[in-house]
Image (cartoon, rainbow, N blue to C red):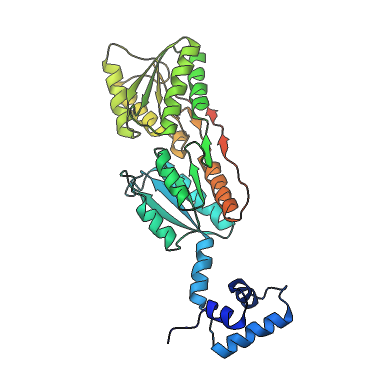
Amino acid sequence: MPPVTLKDVALHAGVSYQTVSNVLNGHPHIRPATKERVLASIAALDYHPNHAAKAFREARTTTLCCAFYGHNPDEVNDPYRNLVQSAFIAEAQAHSYSVTTAFIGQDGDLSPLRQRFLQRHFGGVVIVGTTLMLPQWQTIQQWMLPAVLFDHSLPGALTVSADYPAGMAALVQHHVSTGRRRLALIMPQGDPGSTSVGRREGFKAACAAAGVEGWMVDGDWSYESGYRAMQALWASNRRPDAVLGGNDRMGAGALRAAHDLGVGVPDEVSISGFDDFEFAQFTTPSLTTIQIPHGDMARYAVRTVIGLLKDGSPTSRVFLGSLMVRESA
């Protein structure tokens, strides 16, 4: 014989499914006669609540997912991912939520994320990924999945992001204020992510506004690409007097290359990074950079997705960066 369900009790008592649930959960506004009828049906049918299923449902609503889109799960030393993830977990725990992590590959296959949602592994998600496209976001919305987009912007999406063009403009203006007139930016040239586009566009606009020469050389966010780019710049006939790493790792790579080439920093060339990860304070010389408040952004994203789960009306937010002037520029 199949187990008695909540619907069976509701049918036997002549009440709604929700009324039976309210009686079982001790809702204070149930009429005594209705409560007695429901309890009598529970006894007559020998109904036993499935506490394991109830706990599983409740776990979903108190579990959040931090989903990294296009990130390599094997790159355990990624300072960006580590900072965002640790801030996400700390804020979630402060609100009595647990966290599960997911990785969506470069192929953009969203089906594993959807499967975990349908299996009630989590109730809401923050998607960390600057290359998520609008059709993919619209697909996620069709699942009725409470979702927040982190460090990225798409039309109609609830987003937590930073003003990357303004940050890059502040960095260019700082270099120019110290007398630099030939600025080279190390950046991934084909990266369509909104944070990459923002840095590139901010650089071009700021150089044009200042009336200085500015050009870009390719990098891939790694220390090694910053090192190679600096070597190539110094071997060319077009040497800059300022080199801007599109992130701190490329900036640090350029610093190391300058050291190996015997190039004085900042006397011969000023060098900067972008993001202000912890190690930027401890390079030699210490790295001038733009501080993007990724930790604060991650904490706000957690509060935003919790607001969605609680039927609130959370809003998107754009955070501002801060210029951190150190020894390298």
Residue 52, x across and y down, in percent: 49, 75
Q: Nearer the viewer, residue 46 or 281?
A: 46
**Residue in the picture at 30% in, 18% down:** 233
Q: Nearer the viewer, residue 217 or 279?
A: 217
**Residue in the picture at 43% in, 60% down:** 118
For the question of whether residue 142 can be seen, the reply is: yes
* Left or right of residue 154, residue 189 in this image: left
Residue 254, x across and y down, in percent: 35, 26
Q: Outermost residue toward the top?
A: 211
Q: Nearer the viewer, residue 17 or 29?
A: 17
Quarter of the image where one finds residue 267: top left
Residue 239, x across and y down, in percent: 33, 14
Quarter of the image where one finds residue 182: top left
Please determine whether, in this image, residue 244 is positioned above or below residue 194: above
For the question of whether residue 329 can be seen, the reply is: no
Quarter of the image where one finds residue 235: top left
**Residue in the picture at 50% in, 12% down:** 210
